[in-house]
Image (cartoon, helix red, strand yellow):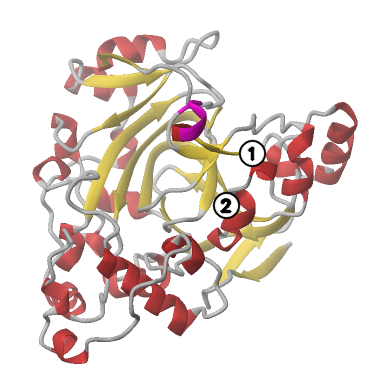
Amino acid sequence: MLRLVVLVGCAASVVSTAEETDGSCPAEGCKDVADAGKRNGKVPLRSLGIPLGHVEVRDTIPTAAEVANHYMNPVGTPVLLKGAAHHILTRTKVEDWTDDFLAKKYPKLKVEAESERIETREAEAKQMKLKGFLKKYRIKEKPLYSVTPIHDSPIGSEFKLPPFIGCGKWLDRLQSVVFWLGDYETKSVLHNDDVDGIMCLLSGQKRWYFIDKRHFKKVQSKACGWNVADKTGRGYGEFVRMNVDNVRPQLHECYDSMEWYHADMEAGDCLLTPTGWFHQVSSFGRALGILMWAYAVPDFNKTSATACAEDDPVTTPLNKLRWHGDEDVTFTARDERWALKWFKQNAPDHPYPEFLTDGRKPPPIHADAEEEEDGGAENEDYDE
């Protein structure tokens, strides 16, 4: 049975299968799994809460303007782009990305290897050559997976930006890009990112669990298991400390009332994940993907809209582009003004601006009309 779901803050409809769940929660009887689990204390995350269906799915490649207006902006929502991964390859096909191909072409490529099938962010990553990794990562007793930056790697020459961000100011807002490879079932922690993500899958399947960032106060609380590594010394970054296959009883109440969406990816698909949305990712089979992060472009519908409409997308390989990391492109005061203005105009009841200002008095929200008309705002220095 199909149903339509409308994501908060976006007019696009979402088509999903009503009963779909992942392997930790069968297609039917999900409530039974949760009820039985609560009795013995073992509950998978996806058996809790209120499932709202699949995120938006598109069979066509969006334009840069559509991405800026609907997905990569302060109130953007996730979207699955069917077949879009074909557009990021410079000289190969999706089906070419086998272990034999990797072993023959990039045997000496240095990769970061981790051994946790269910992520805790506390395991130590080890560096090894790709040829050696390929021999070990599918050993069932102790499988490995790799998350390796490729912005300056030879393998980066195999990929290019998707056409919808390969133009205009997007090129000044690239943060980082990684190569992801693993086998068997692996599961990430529940977390969010402060940049927009684009995951393109070349092999395997991934299932994503999403919580709208409007619930940030609830998720980022002690009652929901939120962990800030700089304060606790556990892991790195900020994330929910839980075993997603076995949620401890103390967290049941929090996630039992949580609304969530999901997205199912297969080889050839790309998924856009907006800044701030909480997500947990499960990978199935031999999964190989490319994950790019970029900051949204403030005031896109000014200078950049014209550039992206008139210019062909760049086909420069990823390892020849400038990826800024966390050094040159950050969330600046200008970004904050733009984000707060966007919330005020498009989602005035959205609670997220409180997170952006973190209790501070926000900067003035105003449109510098003359500056925007002559392109001044578009050319502002991002290193404020």
Mark 2: few, some, or many residues within 10 Å (few <14, many ≥20)? many
Q: For mark 1, does the 10 Å Cα neighbourhood hold few (<14), some (14 to 19), or many (20 or more) residues? A: some
Name the residue carrying label 2: 210
For this rendering, which residue is in front, 3 or 43? 43
Question: Where is residue 223 drawn, in percent x and y?
Answer: 70, 43
> Label 2 amino acid?
Phe
Residue occupied by mark 1: 225
Picture layout, residue 371 above or below residue 275: below
Which range of residues does the magenta coloring cover?
231-235
Does 252 lie within the magenta span?
no
Where residue 285 is drawn, which disc sits there? none
* Location of residue 180 in the rendering, given as x and y in whole percent from the top left corner: 36, 32
* Residue 13 vs residue 322, the one in the foreground: 322
Q: Is residue 297 visible?
A: no
Task: Report the Cα–Cα distance between label 2 and label 1.
Answer: 16 Å
Q: Which element is circle 2 on?
A: strand
Q: Secondary structure at mark 1?
A: loop
**Which residue: 18% across, 22% down?**
105
Residue 6: x %, y % from top left: 61, 72
Residue 374 is at least partly visible in this image: yes
Taking the magenta stretch, the answer to whether it contains residue 232 is: yes
Looking at numbered disc 1 in the image, what kind of residue is underneath it? Gly
Q: Main secondary structure of the magenta part?
A: loop
Name the residue located 41 percent from the left edge and 66 percent from the top edge: 71
User: In this image, 223 relative to 68: left or right?
Assistant: right
